Image (cartoon, rainbow, N blue to C red):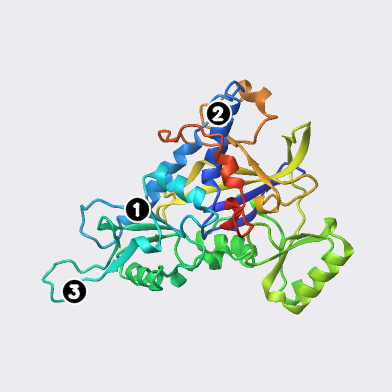
C-alpha cells in the first residue's frame, strides 16, 4: 500500500490519499539514493540512515507469504512473479527494477498459461496452476502491475488469460497482489469514509488526520462545493498522475467556472478537498536554491491481518512540485528527491545540523539486510522520461 502524506503550515502530518491498487514509486526512491551516492558521495549523511533497498526484502516476503497460502503441495518451493504489461508500459522501469531486486520472475501475458488438472489423468494434483511457459515453473504469487484490469488482460492471440488467472485465484491456485477489486477502497470518493471504517472495524482512531473531503455526489455537500470551487481542490474520483486536479485559488476565473459546470453536470465523478498549505523544501534549479512544495509517499507491505503483519518500508518517495505549483506529480512537471529515513540508532544531537536537507522520518525498528544495485546516475533520467502516450513512468500507475 502507498500513503501520500503532507505537512501543513503548522508542521502537522495529514493523509492526502490512499493508494491500494498498484502504488508506484519504490524503485524511483531507490534510484534517487543511488544517484545521490554516485554524484555527491562526500555529502554528510546522518547517523542511522537506513537503506531504501531493504524494501525489496519486504516485497519478496509479502508475496511469498501469500503464495504459501495457496493449495499447492505443502513443502514445495514458492515462486513469485511480477506481471507487467511489458516494455511498452510507462512503468516498465520500475517493474524491471523491482523484479530483479526482489528475485521475482518478470512476466507478461504471453509468458503465462493456465493448466487445469484432468479428471482422468490419474494425477493426485487437484489445484489449477499458472505456469511460466518457457520453463514450466508453477507461479504461486503474482504481483499485478498492469495497465488494464486483470479481468480484461489478453495475450497476443486474444486469449483471455486474465480471466483464466482470476478463476485460478478463486480456486486458491495462485495468490494475487494487490487483490482485484480493492480499487473500491482506492476511490477518492471513499477516502472520506476511511476514519469511520477504522473506527468500526478496528475500534481505533486514526493516528493521522485526513484532509477534509467533500463528496459531490451528496446533494448537501455538492452545494457547498459549487459555492466554493474557487477555494477548494477538485479532482476526479478515478484520477491519477495529477490529471484533472484544479487548485481553485490558483486557477483563473474561467477554469473555476468550467469546473463548476462539470461538477453540476456529472457530480458522481468528482470530489473536493480543502486546500492544505503544503510544506516546502529548498530545491536547486540550476542557478539558486528556492522553495518547492513537496509531499511524501510512504510504503507499507502487508502479509496478513495481524498487528505484526504490516511493515512500513525503510524508503519513501519525496515528490517535488514545479515552481509555482502545488501539484507534485511528475506527469505535471514535478520531480523527486532522495528521502532520508533514520533508524533507532540515530543520534538527534549528531543529526541536528543536517535537518535542512531531505525529509527525515524516524523508524522504530531495525532494517533487514541491505540489498541494491550498483549506483547508476542514469536511473532517475530513465524514470522521468515520458513515453509515447505522454505519461511518465512514476505516474502511469498510482
Kindly identify which residue carries mark 1.
80
Q: Is residue 55 visible?
A: yes
Q: Is residue 398 visible?
A: no
Image quadrant holding the C terminus, namely bottom right
For mark 3, does the 10 Å Cα neighbourhood hold few (<14), some (14 to 19), or many (20 or more) residues? few
Residue occupying image coordinates x 38% and y 73% = 159
Residue 339: x and y in percent read 60, 37
Q: Element under label 1?
A: strand
Is the C-beta separation of discs 2 and 1 under 8 Å? no
Q: Element under label 2?
A: helix
Is the C-beta separation of discs 1 and 3 under 8 Å? no
Q: Which mark, residue 37? A: 2
For mark 2, does the 10 Å Cα neighbourhood hold few (<14), some (14 to 19), or many (20 or more) residues? some
Residue 390's place in the image compared with 46, above or below, is: below
Q: Is residue 375 left or right of residue 166?
A: right
Residue occupying image coordinates x 61% and y 60% = 389
Q: Element under label 3?
A: loop
Residue 242's place in the image compared with 292, above or below, is: below
Residue 280: x and y in percent read 74, 40
Looking at the image, tell me whether mark 2 or mark 1 is earlier in sequence order: 2
Is the C-beta separation of discs 2 and 3 under 8 Å? no
Residue 80: x and y in percent read 34, 53
Kindly identify which residue carries mark 3.
118
> Between residues 223 and 258, which one lies in front from this camera angle?
258
Looking at the image, tell me whether mark 1 or mark 3 is earlier in sequence order: 1
Q: Is residue 187 left or right of residue 139?
A: right
Residue 8: x and y in percent read 74, 46
In space, the residues marked 2 and 1 are separated at their CA atoms by 30 Å
For mark 1, does the 10 Å Cα neighbourhood hold few (<14), some (14 to 19), or many (20 or more) residues? many
Residue 397, quarter of the rendered image? bottom right
Label 2 or label 1, whichever lies nearer to me, is 2
> Between residues 146 and 197, which one lies in front from this camera angle?
146
Amino acid at each position: 500500500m502507498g500513503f501520500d502524506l503532507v505537512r501543513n503550515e503548522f508542521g502537522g502530518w495529514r493523509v492526502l490519499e490512499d493508494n491500494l491498487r498498484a502504488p508506484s514509486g519504490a524503485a524511483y526512491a531507490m534510484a534517487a539514493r543511488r544517484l545521490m551516492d554516485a554524484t555527491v558521495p562526500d555529502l554528510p549523511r546522518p547517523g542511522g540512515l537506513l537503506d531504501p533497498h531493504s524494501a525489496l526484502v519486504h516485497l519478496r516476503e509479502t508475496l511469498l507469504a501469500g503464495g504459501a497460502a495457496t493449495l499447492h503441495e505443502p513443502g514445495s518451493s514458492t515462486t513469485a512473479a511480477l506481471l507487467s504489461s511489458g516494455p511498452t508500459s510507462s512503468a516498465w522501469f520500475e517493474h524491471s527494477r523491482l523484479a530483479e531486486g526482489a528475485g521475482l520472475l518478470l512476466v507478461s501475458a504471453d509468458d503465462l498459461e493456465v493448466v487445469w488438472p484432468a479428471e482422468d489423468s490419474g494425477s493426485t494434483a487437484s489445484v489449477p496452476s499458472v505456469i511460466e511457459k518457457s520453463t514450466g515453473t508453477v507461479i504461486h504469487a503474482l504481483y499485478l502491475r498492469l495497465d488494464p484490469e486483470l479481468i480484461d488482460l489478453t495475450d497476443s492471440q486474444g486469449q483471455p488469460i486474465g480471466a483464466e488467472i482470476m478463476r485460478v485465484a478463486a480456486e486458491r491456485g495462485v495468490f494475487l497482489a494487490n487483490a482485484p477489486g480493492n480499487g473500491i477502497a482506492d476511490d477518492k470518493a471513499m477516502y472520506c469514509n476511511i476514519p469511520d471504517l477504522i473506527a468500526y472495524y478496528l475500534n481505533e482512531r486514526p493516528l493521522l488526520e485526513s484532509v477534509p473531503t467533500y463528496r459531490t455526489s451528496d446533494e448537501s455537500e455538492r452545494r457547498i462545493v459549487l459555492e466554493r470551487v474557487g477555494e477548494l481542490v477538485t479532482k476526479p474520483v478515478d484520477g491519477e498522475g495529477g490529471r484533472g486536479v484544479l487548485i481553485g485559488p490558483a486557477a483563473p476565473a474561467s477554469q473555476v467556472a468550467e469546473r463548476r459546470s462539470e461538477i453540476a453536470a456529472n457530480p458522481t465523478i468528482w470530489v473536493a478537498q480543502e486546500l492544505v498549505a503544503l510544506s516546502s523544501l529548498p530545491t536547486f534549479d540550476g542557478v539558486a536554491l528556492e522553495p518547492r512544495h513537496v509531499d511524501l509517499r510512504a510504503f507499507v507491505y502487508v502479509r496478513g491481518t495481524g498487528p505484526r503483519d504490516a511493515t512500513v518500508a525503510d524508503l519513501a518517495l519525496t515528490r517535488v512540485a514545479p515552481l509555482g505549483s502545488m501539484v507534485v506529480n511528475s506527469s505535471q512537471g514535478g520531480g523527486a528527491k532522495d528521502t532520508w529515513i533514520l533508524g533507532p540508532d540515530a543520534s538527534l544531537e549528531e543529526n541536528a545540523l543536517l535537518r535542512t536537507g531531505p525529509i527525515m522520518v524516524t523508524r522504530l525498528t531495525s532494517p533487514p539486510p541491505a540489498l541494491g544495485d550498483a549506483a547508476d546516475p542514469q536511473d532517475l533520467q530513465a524514470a522521468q522520461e515520458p513515453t509515447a502516450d505522454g505519461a511518465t513512468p512514476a505516474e502511469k500507475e498510482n
